[in-house]
Image (cartoon, grey):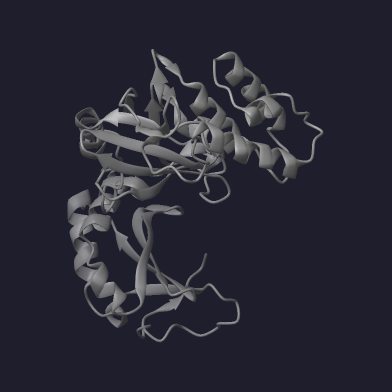
Amino acid sequence: MSEDQGRVVPEQRLFDAVARWNTKTGFGTDDLIDTACAALADGLDSPALRELAGASPRDRLGDLQTLVDTTFEELGIPLPGTLRVGQAVAAGGGTVRRPGVDAIRFEVADVPDESGGGFQVLVYVNDVEMTAVGAGLGMDPYDVLVPDNRLVATAEAHTIPIARCECGVYGCGSTDVTIVRDDDLVHWDWLYEVPINRGVTFAAAEYDVQVDRLATNYDWETSDRTAGRLILRDLDQQALLTHGLKPSWVANDYRNSAVFRVALQLSNTYQIFVDFPWTNHTPAELAHTVCQTLTQHPQTWDATWHAIQPSLTHPPNIAGRTWHHANL
C-alpha cells in the first residue's frame, strides 16, 4: 500500500477502483466514477480525469475504458496487471516499493463438521482473519506445510493456495497468494477471491518468525495427523514415480480408526489404497513402517484398487496377486 502521510494516495485508490471494475458486466462502474471524483477533490487533475469524473454509469463501457486509459496515461499511473509483486502506485505517478506496514500470524484450527472436519491454517493480517473473508476456509496444513513449507518466502515469487470454499473443496472457492522476498520485506499479493483490495507487505524478519512458529508447532496434531506428516515428509516419492504413482492422501480409515490408510493415484486411471494397522505403534513407528513398505515393488503390497474411469474393470498393471477391488 503506497502511503502519503499515513493515507493511501489518490493514484493508488484510482488504480484499485479500475482493478475492481469489470469491463464486461459494468460491475464497479459507480465506484470507478466516484473514485475519479474523489481524486479530483484530493488534488489530482487531468483533462481525461475530469471527463471520467463527469461520466455516467450508463455510458458505453468501451468509452469509459478509453477515458480510463487516457487518464492513466496523463497521470502516469500504470494499468492493472502491469505491476510487479510488491509494487504500489506512487504519488505523482509511477511505482514505489510497497512498505512493510502489515503484520501477520498463523493458527491451526478445527474445520467445522459441516465443512467436512479436519484442520485449517488460519491467516491473520493486521489481526483480521483472511481465509474466512476470502474463499471461506483455510487450507489443510498438509497442503501448505508438508512435505515442504510453501509459506517460506524466497526471492523467486511463487503462488500457493491460502483458502478454499466453505464446503472444504479448493477450486469450488479459492484464494491464492503470490509470495516473494524483497530484501528485508516479504510481499503477498492476493488472487481470485481476494479478502482485501490491496497487497500486503511484512518485515521479513518477523514474517520468518511467524512462518517458523507455525511449521514447528505440533500441539494441534492428533496421532494420525502426526503419522501423516511424517509419512508425507519422508516418503520416497521418486521410487513411487517409477511406477507412475503419486501420494493422494493419508489418514485413518473413516470406517475403522485402528487402520491407517495411504491413498495413491496411478495417473488419472486408478486409486490405490494400502492399509496399515496401528497395533500399538507410535506415530513415528507407523510412519517408518509405511515408508519402508512403499519403497518395495507394488506387487508385494497388500493393497486394494479403485478405477477412476468406470470403463476400467480390471486391476492396474502394477497389481500383485493379493490385490483386490476396494469396497468404498
User: Percent from the top left, x then y, of residue 202?
Assistant: 30, 29
Q: Which of 69 and 34 is in front in this view?
A: 69
Quadrant where the N terminus sits is top left
Q: Does 320 appear above or below 1?
A: below
User: In the image, is 191 to the left or to the right of 145?
Assistant: right
Residue drawn at 23 percent across, 53 percent down: 230
Displayed quadrant of residue 177: top left
User: How many marks on residues?
Assistant: 0
Q: Nearer the viewer, residue 92 or 261?
A: 92
Q: Does 279 appear above or below 292?
A: above
One can see residue 269 in this view: yes
User: In the image, is 225 to the left or to the right of 67?
Assistant: left
Q: Which of 240 and 276 is in front in this view?
A: 240
Residue drawn at 56 percent across, 28 percent down: 14
Q: Does 190 appear above or below 228?
A: above
User: Percent from the top left, x then y, of residue 182?
Assistant: 26, 39
Q: Which residue lies furthest to the right in this view?
A: 58
User: Percent from the top left, x then y, of residue 93?
Assistant: 45, 31
Q: Nearer the viewer, residue 202 or 160?
A: 202
User: Percent from the top left, x then y, of residue 59?
Assistant: 80, 35
One can see residue 164 in this view: no
